[in-house]
């Protein structure tokens, strides 16, 4: 009953925010994630096997590969690090992570930041200990360890939402939002800047409320998989979400699969290009210590990263779709545009972009961001043959 009451209070609180209150609430998290977070997360490759040694190796490789210098910063531990609570209820890491503070110190010594994972429920998705009823205690522990990023994953709260909402989705949603807000307050109380990543698979349009509960980024979809069908379904379904992103607040179509082996180089270039057009977080999900040169060159393409990290922070969107051929555009700083010609079909195909369709007229200077060729001045339209499942990505500027 108490939960019910506070859930409704939360709903009316959200509805009654004045523009002033809203802007001061948003301002609290404004200094964090001014561009989409970049880094690495253990889950896509290591799943439950991740250990302290793997995380250190990832940090080492992030430096040695040039990824850190290209902008990758966060080294994020995902699920399965959690141990039991001690007699005072403090969360402890399990035997795979003998000393979390020492790990954070190590990651920081490389000029990188450490991320961690928990759930608003009693357990996580992998059935490890969650933060339910221990929110402040856990936030304090993360701050003490030196954590810089928290991914907060809904899973374990769902049975509670189901029990307490009696089938009313609005009540269930309010319970969820209240749980996210609770951890947001706990993180603020630590006075440590901790990027707050909401993971609830896009249920109930998080782009409309996640910033109100302190989210710097929020998952918009279910889990990605390392195959073209799945990655492209997730990526291309992001059309229409651009207006919800801004510095400090990002749509998150999930972590990268580049280098995990399930896609061709052209398909991984599509993955990287689409995520950059979408102003998506770039969290590599491969084993960085065993990266081949193709993977490294895709992940460290500075021109494509510059699109992702553009300081305007405007997410791009679909401009045209004709059969499997799609043109997407992202507005960039100083009037420039990133334009991606995607071929979702099974055969190499010429694709044309009309400059007027991407808001340009007159001659523009074009650079191909994957071949790094200067294409000189382009007028009216530009056509390129795009490989199957591949992309041609351009930067256009006056
Ligand atoms: C969920 C999340 C994944 C990962 C796993 C860990 O499925 O969406 O990204 O964190 O949980 O259990």
Image (tube, rainbow, N blue to C red):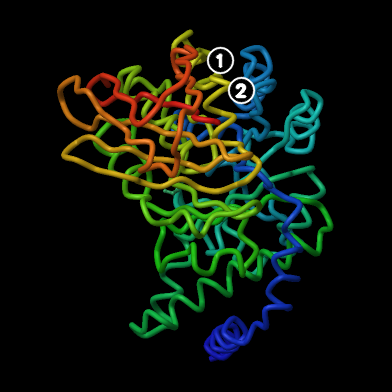
User: Which residue corresponds to mark 2?
Assistant: 58
Q: Write down the quadrant of residue 350 in the picture.
A: top left
Q: How far apart are marks 1 and 2 (CA)?
A: 6 Å
Relative to 329, is 72 above or below?
above
Relative to 350, is 81 above or below?
below
For residue 34, the mark is none
Task: Using the image as rendered, state which of residue 111 and residue 320 is in the foreground.
Answer: 320
Q: For mark 2, give the secondary structure.
A: helix
User: Which residue corresponds to mark 1?
Assistant: 289
Q: In the displayed orientation, state which residue is furthest to the top.
A: 293
Q: In the displayed orientation, state which residue is furthest to the front.
A: 362
Q: Mark 1 touching mark 2, by CB under 8 A?
A: yes
Q: Where residue 297 appears, x then y in whole percent?
A: 50, 14
Q: Residue at x 60, y 88 (%)?
A: 9
Task: Using the image as rendered, state which of residue 49 and residue 37 is in the foreground.
Answer: 37
Q: Where residue 84 appears, x then y in whole percent?
A: 63, 51
Q: Is residue 284 left or right of residue 343?
A: right
Q: For mark 1, give the secondary structure.
A: helix
Task: Using the image as rendered, state which of residue 169 and residue 52 is in the foreground.
Answer: 169
Q: Where residue 358 appears, x then y in whole percent?
A: 40, 42
Relative to 63, is 45 above or below?
below
Please rate how many residues cluster around mark 2, counting C-alpha atoms within 10 Å: few if below 14, some from 14 to 19, many from 20: many
Q: Residue at x 41, y 59 (%)?
A: 202
């Amino acid at each position: 009953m108490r939960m019910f009451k506070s859930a409704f209070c939360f709903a009316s609180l959200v509805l009654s925010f004045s523009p002033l209150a809203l802007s001061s609430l948003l301002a609290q998290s404004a200094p964090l994630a001014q561009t989409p977070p970049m880094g690495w997360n253990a889950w896509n490759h290591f799943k439950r096997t991740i250990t302290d040694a793997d995380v250190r190796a990832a940090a080492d490789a992030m430096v040695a590969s040039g990824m850190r210098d290209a902008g990758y910063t966060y080294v994020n531990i995902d699920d399965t690090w959690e141990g039991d609570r001690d007699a005072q209820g403090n969360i402890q890491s399990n035997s795979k992570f003998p000393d979390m503070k020492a790990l954070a110190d190590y990651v920081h010594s490389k000029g990188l930041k450490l991320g961690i994972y928990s759930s608003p429920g009693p357990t996580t998705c992998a059935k490890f200990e969650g933060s339910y009823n221990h929110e402040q205690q856990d936030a304090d522990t993360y701050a003490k360890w030196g954590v810089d990023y928290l991914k907060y994953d809904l899973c374990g709260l769902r049975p509670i939402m189901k029990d307490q909402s009696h089938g009313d989705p609005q009540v269930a949603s309010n319970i969820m939002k209240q749980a996210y807000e609770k951890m947001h307050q706990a993180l603020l109380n630590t006075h440590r800047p901790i990027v707050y990543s909401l993971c609830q698979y896009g249920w109930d349009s998080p782009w409309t409320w996640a910033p109100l509960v302190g989210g710097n980024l929020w998952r918009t979809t279910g889990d990605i998989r390392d195959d073209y069908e799945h990655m492209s379904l997730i990526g291309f379904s992001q059309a229409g979400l651009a207006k919800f992103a801004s510095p400090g607040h990002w749509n998150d179509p999930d972590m990268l699969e580049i280098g995990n082996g399930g896609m061709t180089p052209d398909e991984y270039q599509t993955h990287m290009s689409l995520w950059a057009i979408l102003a998506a977080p770039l969290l590599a999900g491969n084993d960085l210590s065993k990266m081949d040169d193709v993977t490294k060159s895709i992940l460290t393409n500075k021109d494509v990263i510059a699109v992702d990290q553009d300081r305007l922070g405007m997410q791009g969107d679909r401009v045209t779709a004709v059969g499997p051929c799609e043109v997407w555009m992202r507005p960039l700083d100083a009037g420039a545009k990133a334009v991606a010609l995607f071929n979702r079909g099974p055969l190499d195909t010429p694709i044309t972009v009309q400059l007027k369709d991407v808001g340009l007229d007159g001659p523009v200077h074009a650079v191909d961001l994957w071949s790094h060729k200067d294409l000189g001045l382009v007028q009216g339209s530009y056509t390129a043959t795009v490989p199957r499942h591949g992309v041609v990505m351009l930067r256009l500027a006056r």
